[in-house]
Amino acid sequence: MTDRDRPEAGPAYPPVTVVVATRDRPGLLERAVRAVLDQDHPGPVECLVVYDHTDIRPLDLPVPANRTLRYVANSRSRGLPGGRNTGVAAASHELVAFCDDDDFWLAAKLRRQVALLTERPDAAAASCGIRLEGPGVAKERRLAAAEVTLADFIEDRVMEVHSSTLLIRRSTWDAVGPVDEELPGGYGEDYEWLLRIAAHGPVVVVPEVLVVVDWHGGSFFFGRWAMIVEATRYLLDKHPELAGSRRGLARLHGQIAFALASGRRRREAVRELGRVLRLNPREKRVLVTVPVVLGLLSGEQVLRLAQRTGRGV
């Protein structure tokens, strides 16, 4: 869609701010920002790049008409939560979307989500399908359901609702609060925030794939086992509603058991596995944790095997 083809902005085409938090990934960042600026949403789009405690380096990109590109420094805690919170505080518009700097959007992403969110005033946020792309991985993940509720998120993480898919109203942000900067290491900050969003209203879903997620087989959290244990226990303490689902509770305690085993805290891991089995004997993390407890595989090896199939643990 060219500038000449775009309808004039109005109530049907509200302006959107897109927050892209980044640190030291200029090539990937340029790809992400270019895709934001090239959205076919007819209304104004502001792309706000938040540099995480590093020097601001403006990108050499053309900025089309009806688009703006701004840069700010993360003024809050180091990491994604602080970066996203800084971005929303500086955002110019009522609708706010997020894109990780290593992901990118297809051109119709904002237009389709804005239309859906406009149709659903009861919704707290909008999401869409994703495509995982990386070495040896090319996999689409989309939801058949039209919306995801708090009960769904309590039962399962619902990985299709990825941070790079989210579009929210500022009124939702004000109601649920910012991303939690107290989470140990920032681990699971998107899931914790989604629990609060879904408690405010459902997350509606555009059924097609509109976001490409870079599945590079690594993570900032890779191997930080003690921090993962601490963060998951923090999440359980903060959200007592998670205890309402035996399946969901088993999943989280299974993650704790896996991280304990991977960090060679085997005795603690066995105790945690006992809790998991009592909650849900079919919890899949039991099967991947036992070989780690026995020393047959390392946690890193299990994660790499899982990531080759487009999954985590």
Image: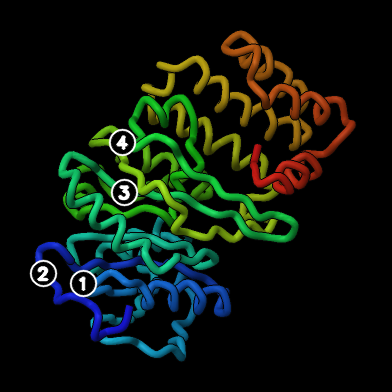
Q: Secondary structure at mark 4?
A: helix
Q: Nearer the viewer, residue 175 or 117?
A: 117
Quadrant placement of the C terminus: top right
Which of 155/64 is in front? 64
How many numbered badges does the structure rendering display? 4
Asked which colour scheme the image uses, the reply is rainbow
To which residue does mark 3 refer? 126
Q: Which residue is mark 1?
A: 43
Q: Amino acid at mark 3?
A: Ala
Residue 231: where, in percent of width, then height?
52, 38
Residue 223 coordinates in the image, percent (x, y): 71, 47
Disc 4 target residue? 198
At horizontal 62% and vertical 16% (from top left) the residue drawn is 276
Q: CA distance from mark 1 to mark 3?
A: 17 Å
Image vertical order of residue 238 relative to residue 45, above or below: above
Residue pictured at 62% horizontal, 50% vertical: 139
Amino acid carrying mark 1 in the image: Gly
Instruction: Report whether 65 appears left or right of 157.
Output: left
Question: CB of mark 1 within 8 Å of CB of mark 2?
Answer: yes
Mark 3 or 4, nearer chain start: 3
Q: Amino acid at mark 2?
A: Gly
> Residue 10 got which mark?
2
Q: Is residue 299 above or below residue 276?
A: below
